[in-house]
Image (cartoon, rainbow, N blue to C red):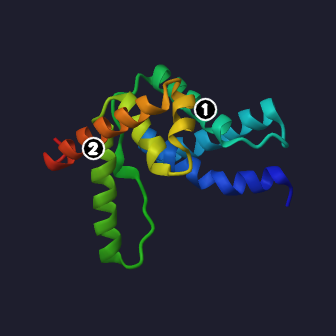
């Protein structure tokens, strides 16, 4: 396996999770993963494997979609989740849909920040570079965004 294939295998699922949280649309997230890797490969080739650049490209692709569609919310009803048994799958799906719907109620800047942090594979410094803000500002914004998300979840997502 070449270096780029390993890079793709290491980050495709993480990037998908980030893009799913940003868009709430599983098919759009898949399309954006493909587009992001294609742009990355076309611009940087197979040898410069940098997750910061990959997430920046993915972020720009999402912002392009938001600008084009003027996306105001997400459709969490179409999200699929793997399950162990039917009952657990329904419980997991309801929880997942509730969280996605709550994230969708957040401002795009907060939604983006939460989505980048939740993936866990980027440092606050890298997130700051992607968003063009300082690491300390990322920490403050993350804290505030988490508080807003907690408030939305506590209010029943309404």
Q: Which is closer to the viewer, label 1 or label 2?
A: 1
Q: What residue do we see at 51% from left, 27% from top?
A: 131
Q: Measured from the top left, where is residue 138 in percent x and y?
A: 43, 33
N-terminal of the pair, mark 1 or mark 2, is: 1
Give the quarter of the figure containing the C terminus: top left
Residue 102 tag number: 2
Q: Where is residue 8 in the image (x, y as percent from the top left)?
A: 72, 51
Point out the residue furthest to the left here.
155
Locate residue 154 relative to residue 110 in the image: left or right. left
Residue at the extreme front: 136
Helix, strand or loop under label 2 = helix
Residue drawn at (34%, 50%), measured in percent from left and top? 77
Q: In this view, does 132 lie to the left or right of 143?
A: right
Task: Write the residue at 71% across / 41% down.
Answer: 50
Is 58 displayed left or right of 131 in the figure? right
Specify few, some or many for label 2: CA neighbours under 10 Å numbering under 14, 14-19, or 20 or more.
many
- Is residue 35 visible in the rendered structure shown here? no
The span from disc 1 to disc 2 (Cα, nearest Å) is: 24 Å
Name the quadrant containing residue 47. top right
Determine which of the numbered discs, if any, sits on residue 56 in the image. 1
Answer left or right for 95 relative to 2. left
């Amino acid at each position: 396996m070449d270096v780029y294939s390993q890079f793709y295998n290491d980050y495709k699922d993480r990037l998908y999770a980030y893009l799913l949280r940003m868009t709430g649309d599983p098919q759009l997230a898949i399309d954006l993963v493909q587009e992001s890797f294609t742009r990355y490969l076309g611009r940087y080739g197979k040898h410069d494997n940098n997750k910061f650049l990959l997430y920046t490209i993915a972020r720009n692709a999402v912002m392009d979609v938001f600008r084009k569609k003027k996306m105001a919310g997400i459709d969490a009803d179409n999200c699929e989740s793997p399950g162990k048994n039917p009952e657990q799958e329904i419980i997991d799906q309801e929880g997942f849909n509730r969280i996605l719907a709550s994230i969708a109620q957040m401002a795009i800047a907060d939604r983006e920040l939460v989505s980048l942090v939740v993936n866990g594979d980027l440092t606050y410094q890298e997130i700051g570079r992607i968003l063009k803000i300082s690491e300390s500002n990322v920490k403050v914004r993350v804290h505030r965004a988490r508080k807003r998300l907690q408030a939305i979840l506590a209010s029943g997502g309404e």
